[in-house]
Amino acid sequence: MKNNNVWIASFTASVIIAIALLVAGSPSVTASDQPSAASAAVNIDNFVFGPQTITVPVGATVTWTNKDDIPHTSVSTDGVFKSKVLDTDEKFSYKFEKAGTYPYYCTIHPKMTGKVVVQ
Amino acid sequence: MTDKNKDLIDQKLQDLNNDGIDRRGFLKCMAWAGTGLVWTMSGGIPTSRAFAKTAHRSGGNGADFTFVQISDSHIGFSKPANPDVTATLQTAINKINAMPHKPDFIIHTGDLSQLSKPSEFDTLDQVLKGASAKQVYFVPGEHDMLSDNGEQYLQRYGKGTKGSGWYSFDNKGVHFVGLVNVANLKAGGMGSLGHEQLEWLEDDLEGRSASTPIVLFAHIPLWTIYPDWGWGTDDSEQALSYVKRFGSVTVLNGHIHQIMQKVEGRVSFHTAMSTAFPQPAPGTAPSAGPMKVPADQLQRVLGITDVNYLVSGRSLAVVDSPLGNSGSSASENEGAPLAVIGSSKG
């Protein structure tokens, strides 16, 4: 009898610990998080990425839209993502699966820089 | 006409009571730019002579020649600033063909195309076929590098070039160097030549007599005009240090779609107008993008550059002309100012 109780107690404790670990380990449980379809937009206009720094949750998709009358690109400085050349009204999307900071720039007009912060 | 011009210039030079040339007087001077005046610094005193008709008068001096710089044709661009860039390029070619002297060749300082598309390059080639000068030298602009590091461009215009498309050639004693400063651009940076190209340039110039006139041409300006808009080349200082010893250096660039000039010692810098659309002066607009002007003024803010090399003074005279003139009344855009090009006598 006593052994059973001990066994149940420790089993329950393990389960609770395991759940706690699962919950702690998952970064996606925050008040502002949306379960799966998080997205954000960056507009390219007048040789500027707007907003220049954008913060999104892990798993979010960022979509760049070129509203300028000149083509631009959106290319990660660390080789993480690379858009094709975007003419006016063309878009490029990238889904950020990992947390981190992702600086990027326009390879045609390198003075144009931006940053995606994923957390 | 020639003598009248000369007399008026002498008047201006001798008019020491000049309060500063007034606007109308200044604009009159500008209107002469189309005829072509050569200013040379001789013992520190500027002297001038009209050269347009005289360039080939010295029959014995066969080494005099001219070439034309065009730039930023942006074939494929089709927005309000210019819905038909092919037509304005054709106007530029017609203008070249109408010149009294046939240029030895044309130099295109880049942004041939808008999006590096084969059809755009095809159209450009088609228009250039109709030029009186059959030889055209190119350097790419950033718009020509959009297909896999400029593969499309190199295939078509890169024969005999190195790296991303740099090369040099000689014409009647003048040494020309085409540089590429639009490849491998770094985030936050401006134009860039890169280590490999700089090493090649140093080698290429080594051993050449200092009296050899040098012409460097590249798309993005090789001097810093406006860093915020990327109008400059991060490592151009090194390139310019290699040409310092030469008696006459001319640097021809494009990219900014307007004329800017600077003389520093024996080096003259010049940027050309575009044949497609103008861009705003530095800092006068939110960005460097295409600038729309009233339709009847478009021809005046687009243009070509005629460069005359005179062996006698080992000097190059750079004359910009807009695609269209306004007629009798001069305006701010009428006939661009010409550059003073040093002679080889230091």
Image (spheres, grey):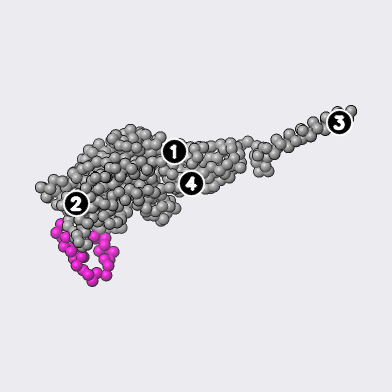
User: For the stretch drawn in magenta, what is the main secondary structure?
Assistant: helix
Q: CA distance from mark 3 to mark 1?
A: 67 Å
Q: Identify the residue position indicated by label 4 in the image.
A: A113
Q: Position of residue B8 (x, y in %)?
A: 18, 63
Q: CA distance from mark 4 to mark 3?
A: 62 Å
Residue at position x 35%, y 51% in the image: B237
Q: CA distance from mark 2 to mark 4?
A: 45 Å
Q: Residues within 10 Å of mark 2 (few under 14, many from 20)?
A: many
Q: Residue furthest left?
A: B60
Q: CA distance from mark 4 to mark 1?
A: 16 Å
Comparing labels 2 and 4, the label whose residue is closer to the camera: 2
The quadrant in which residue B5 appears is bottom left
Q: Are marks 4 and 1 in contact (CB under 8 Å)?
A: no
Q: In this orientation, which residue lies closer to the viewer: A61 or B130?
A: A61
Comparing labels 4 and 3, the label whose residue is closer to the camera: 3
Q: Identify the residue position indicated by label 2 in the image.
A: B314
Kindly identify which chain the residue marked by label 2 belongs to: B
Q: Are marks 3 and 1 in contact (CB under 8 Å)?
A: no
Q: Position of residue B57 (x, y in %)?
A: 12, 50
> What label does residue A85 carry, if any?
1
Callout 3, which amino acid? Asn
Q: CA distance from mark 2 to mark 3?
A: 104 Å
> What label does residue B59 carry, if any?
none
Q: Earlier in the sequence, mark 3 or mark 1?
A: 3
Q: Residues within 10 Å of mark 4 (few under 14, many from 20)?
A: many
Comparing labels 2 and 3, the label whose residue is closer to the camera: 3
Q: Mark 4 and mark 1, same subunit?
A: yes
Residue at position x 23%, y 38% in the image: B135
Callout 1, which amino acid? Val
> What label does residue A5 carry, if any?
3
* Residue B246 among those drawn in magenta: no
